[in-house]
Image (tube, rainbow, N blue to C red):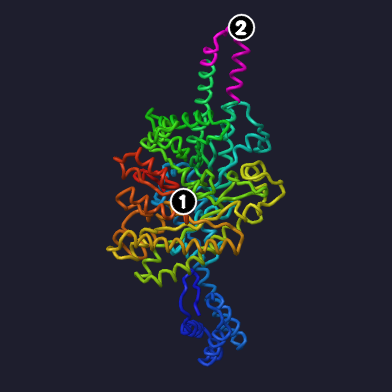
Amino acid sequence: MKIVKRNGKIVDYDAEKIRIAIKKANNDVDDLDKASDAEINKIIKYIENSNKHKKRLLVEDIQDIIEKKLVELNKYELSKCYMLYRYERELIRRANTTDESILTLIKNSNKDIKNKNANTALAKRDLIASEVSKDLTRRILLPEQISEAHEEGILYFHAPEYFLETMFNSSILNIQDMLDKGIVINDKLIESPKNFQMTCQILSTIILEASISQYGEITIYLKDLSKYLKKSEENIKKNITKKLKDKITNNEFLNELLEEKLKEELENGIQTLILEMNTISTSNAKNPPLTIFMYLDENDKYLKYTVMLIEELLNQTIKGLKDEDKNYLALTSPQLIYVLDKNNNLTNGKYDYLTSLTLKCLTKDANIRYISAKKMREYYDNNVFSPCGDIILPLYRDDAKEYKFKGRFNQGIVSINLTQIAILACQDETKFFNLLDERLDLCYEALMCKHRALLGTLVSISPLNFQYGGIARLNKNDVIDKLLKNGYSTISLSYSGLYESIKLMKLPTSTNQSLEMFALKILKTMHTYTEKWKKETGVTFTLQTADKISLYHLLKIDKEKFGIIKDITDKECYNNFETLDDIYEKLDFESKFQKLSPSAIQIDISKNNNLDLKKLIRYLYDNILYVKFIDKSKGEI
């Protein structure tokens, strides 16, 4: 029999620990109330016999049995002392821990906060509220074994500060539905816009409002704005013709004037959107986390206008915005996802010039990602669609058996610390996978905590998303439960330190092939679990790489627990193969994992200053599903 401790660790059953615990309670009662050795043995025998068919038993269950058997033996005072001791230990474990962290925020001395706006009043208010929320989540809302597993670095429970509220992680907003049918915000109807500039203003309002209901990325399709650029073109042409119908006899001049006016409308609209996304703040004093998906779909009836939108967005991203000294700065929002296809992969394609603009964005520190349409079609039944943040969601068909790509969302994330498992396994592969199995069970419980927290959520908690088309159009008195199962939304198991774990488990003389096989074995094990959980619950679980925040915190815990381990804990955060020197070796290595874990492979642009980007683009199109360029030298947590 195995015992599950409060922190989630699984240990061998040890009868001697029961004996010691009861004898400690014996010390606080009179001789007549003490339990004899024979009585203690009787309690131990009862525990063993009544649970001999159970593989695992919670430590709390054993304590409950002890209290019950002491009462049956008429050892009331002893039972009371044992209960009080247990209660005192519980109070110690649940003690409020927010005071020190709040004081460090007030004094600006919290070293874990690296947000440049952290000293503003709005940011401090949010950070203090977050500390209180995290503490309540840890002490009261989460099962104790999950809270302790988080504290021990066994897993990372993402965004605990938002667990009190009904908030999900990330989404792909259905901007097309909202703009076409109209929305209601603060009881005010916003009808479908009549021109492009108004569209961009409404979109900014939508993004800000939507960000209140989630804490991760908001993704939109840029082509959903194309229809409204065409509306502007029609309006401009109508106005010019009306005002100058008797003065213009040259169609060429008319077209030039129309083009000039439309370009002005386009430039002002995109500028409005960019300015709003980089100046307005959400409740946590940050810019809305907007990502824009750019795809040159030859079947798009508004493709001409989509091309214009992409070009203008890229040009303004390259230009950036001025600071108070009138120096141009890189944009913090939006982030960009650009699809590489036959028509723009830098092999004499029609839209290669747009791809060249994306490369200029990279040199301006823009956060940009690339999708290979070729690989996506191969993996996803000939479809090309936007990821949700850093992960590509599995395909989903609605009731009409049509693929649905917009309006989907991710419920939340829990990360498993693979490095800590490898440290404890000491190059024993059997021990590694036994520990992995045990900790995946804990991760499942943590993920289901996130899922259950969203069950029963009323549509009215976020009307923009659930009533007015951002995610769905449900009745205002409905709950969102049907959106939480059967693939409409997902919930993610992420993994931290895959590179460090295989390095620890395999000797330095291991070949890349043996490292790859071991990494695949780990991923296949986790993928098998997510498929099993999906079958048991109806919830769609996905597998992805961990984000920088969890990688940073898990390494910090392991460094405190295990000290400095060369090339493992002697850095800022764990990673996934960032230390492979050759970028093509890294891409080839990690691409083999993208079917199991369809998340973005990260390329640190600061480490590859002399890279031939055109050659890289052609390689990405042919070989890599999803890539994210980052600059670690300027990243913030």
Q: Secondary structure at mark 2?
A: loop
Q: Residues within 10 Å of mark 1 (few under 14, many from 20)?
A: many
Q: Are marks 1 and 2 in contact (CB under 8 Å)?
A: no
Give the percent coordinates (x, y) of residue 153: 43, 62
Q: If you read the primary sequence from the N terminus, does the residue marked by circle 1 or circle 2 appear first?
A: 2
Residue at x 40% of width, y 72% of height: 430
**At label 2, which amino acid type do we have?**
Asp
Q: Which residue is mark 2?
A: 246
State the residue lying farthest toward the top.
247
Residue stretch in magenta: 231-256
**At label 1, which amino acid type do we have?**
Ser
**Magenta residues, dominant SS class:** helix
Task: Tell me if residue 250 is in the magenta stretch.
Answer: yes
Q: Which residue is mark 1?
A: 599
State the residue lying farthest toward the left.
509
Task: Tell me if residue 334 is in the magenta stretch.
Answer: no
Residue 618 lies in quadrant? top left
Residue 277 relative to residue 403: left or right: left
Give the percent coordinates (x, y) of residue 30: 53, 88
Question: Number of callouts in the render?
Answer: 2
Q: Is residue 235 above or below residue 250?
A: below
